[in-house]
Image (cartoon, rainbow, N blue to C red):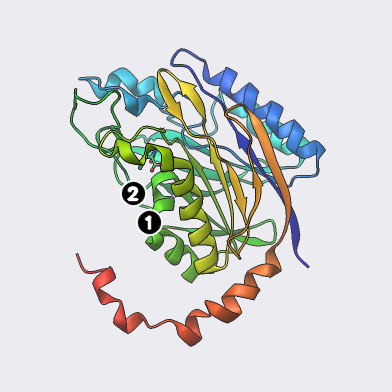
């Protein structure tokens, strides 16, 4: 049995003027908790170093350049890499990436227990809008601040597992999970910042936690993968973000769930071989899948 102890490091709100060092210290505290309970991996949220700044419009994007990371690791994040090595625990973290040639992405990385970056993903499904829509109580300007990811949906070999990554809105799209499933993922890790209020359909606000679980449970069951999905949660700069961090089994069963919107870990021991219960049976892609019937799915 390939057992692994996995943890989610849920974060409460990060204020606009909170330093990255402060956010890193909060994540290191969660890393110590997870390591003390035997975790080999901890998953942090999307954009885990800063407040969710796409909720504000700025005329000049460079006014928010300080929200981005030009290199990884860097002085602010290095203590987290050092703690990971000392505690012998791998981690996944989301952050805003500004590349040397000026491209901006909503990015996540996987770092192994030796402090080495072994995988990177750049968010493909960017929700929201690219113009300042003043009717909204808050903006959702990911299409303004970030470019669509250009690294596909990669799966990495780490910790004796095949690990895939995605970010937030990606989890709502079945295509994300199916591509990772077709690449042989056994564990999908992701972070999210999800406002409770969805201005275009406020009648769905009470369903945000349900839609979060529905998306992840379906993705796990329909591809026979485990998932650790972790929130940045709570009342952050006037915007209520949902919590609801989860660990979900290949059967779709939720086996761990956060309680409340504060900094906290969720943790579980998972058996990666259980993916086969699904991948070799009900969702045996070779035996049962009919790709010739699905061409509409990838037509432009
Ligand atoms: N946030 C949200 C998400 O997909 C959203 C955007 C909120 C979509 C509510 C639908 C409903 O979880 C990010 N950052 O993608």
**Mark 2 sits near ligand 1, with its Cβ under 8 Å away:** yes
Label 1 close to label 2 by CB (< 8 Å): yes
Report, in whole angstroms, how far the alpha carbon at label 1 lies from the one at label 2.
8 Å
Q: Is residue 124 left or right of residue 184?
A: left
Q: Residue 26 placed where, x, y %?
A: 64, 24
Label 1 residue SS: loop
Q: Is residue 220 visible?
A: yes
Q: Residue 25 placed where, x, y %?
A: 64, 22
Q: Residue 150 placed where, x, y %?
A: 34, 51
> Counting other residues with Cα less than 10 Å from the Cα at mark 1, is it few (<14), some (14-19), or many (20 or more)?
few
Q: Is residue 291 left or right of residue 84?
A: left
Q: Is residue 103 visible?
A: no
Q: Which mark is residue 173?
A: 1
Q: Is residue 124 left or right of residue 289?
A: left
Which quarter of the rendering shows the C terminus?
A: bottom left
| In the image, farthest residue toward the top | 17
Label 2 residue SS: loop
Q: Which mark is residue 125?
A: 2
Please name which of the two marks, 1 or 2, marks the residue nearer to the observer. 1
- Identify which residue is drawn at 42% across, 38% down: 206
- Identify which residue is drawn at 28% across, 39% down: 201
Instruction: Give the image quadrant in which the ligand numbered 1 is located.
Output: top left
Mark nearer the N terminus (1 vs 2): 2
Image quarter of residue 93: top right
In this orientation, which residue lies closer to the viewer: 298 or 236? 236
Q: Residue 148 placed where, x, y %?
A: 30, 46
Which quarter of the rendering shows the N terminus?
A: bottom right
Image quarter of residue 104: top left
> Counting other residues with Cα less than 10 Å from the Cα at mark 2, is it few (<14), some (14-19), or many (20 or more)?
some
Is 182 placed above or below 90 here?
Answer: below
């Amino acid at each position: 049995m390939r057992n692994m102890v996995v943890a989610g490091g849920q974060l409460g709100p990060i204020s606009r003027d909170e330093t990255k060092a402060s956010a890193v210290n909060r994540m290191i505290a969660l890393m110590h908790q997870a390591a003390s309970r035997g975790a080999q991996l901890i998953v942090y949220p999307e954009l885990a170093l800063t407040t969710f700044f796409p909720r504000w419009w700025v005329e000049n994007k460079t006014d928010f350049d300080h929200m981005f990371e030009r290199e990884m690791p860097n002085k602010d994040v290095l203590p987290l890499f050092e703690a990971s090595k000392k505690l012998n625990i791998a981690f996944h973290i989301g952050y805003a990436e500004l590349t040397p040639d000026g491209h901006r992405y909503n990015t996540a990385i996987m770092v192994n227990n030796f402090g080495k970056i072994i995988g990177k993903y750049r968010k493909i499904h960017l929700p929201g809008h690219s113009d300042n829509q003043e009717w909204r109580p808050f903006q959702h300007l990911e299409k303004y601040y970030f470019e669509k990811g250009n690294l596909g949906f990669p799966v990495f070999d780490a910790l004796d597992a095949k690990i895939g990554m995605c970010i937030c809105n990606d989890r709502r799209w079945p295509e994300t999970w199916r591509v990772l499933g077709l690449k042989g993922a056994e564990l999908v890790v992701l972070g999210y910042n999800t406002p409770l209020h969805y201005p275009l359909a406020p009648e769905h606000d009470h369903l945000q936690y349900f839609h979060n679980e529905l998306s992840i449970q379906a993705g796990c069951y329909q591809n026979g993968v485990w998932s650790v999905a972790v929130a940045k949660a709570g009342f952050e700069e006037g915007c209520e973000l949902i919590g609801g961090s989860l660990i979900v089994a290949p059967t779709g069963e939720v086996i761990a769930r956060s309680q409340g919107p504060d900094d906290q870990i969720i943790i579980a021991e998972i058996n990666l071989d259980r993916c086969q219960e699904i991948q070799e049976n009900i969702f045996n892609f070779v035996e049962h899948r009919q790709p010739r019937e699905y061409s509409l799915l990838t037509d432009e």
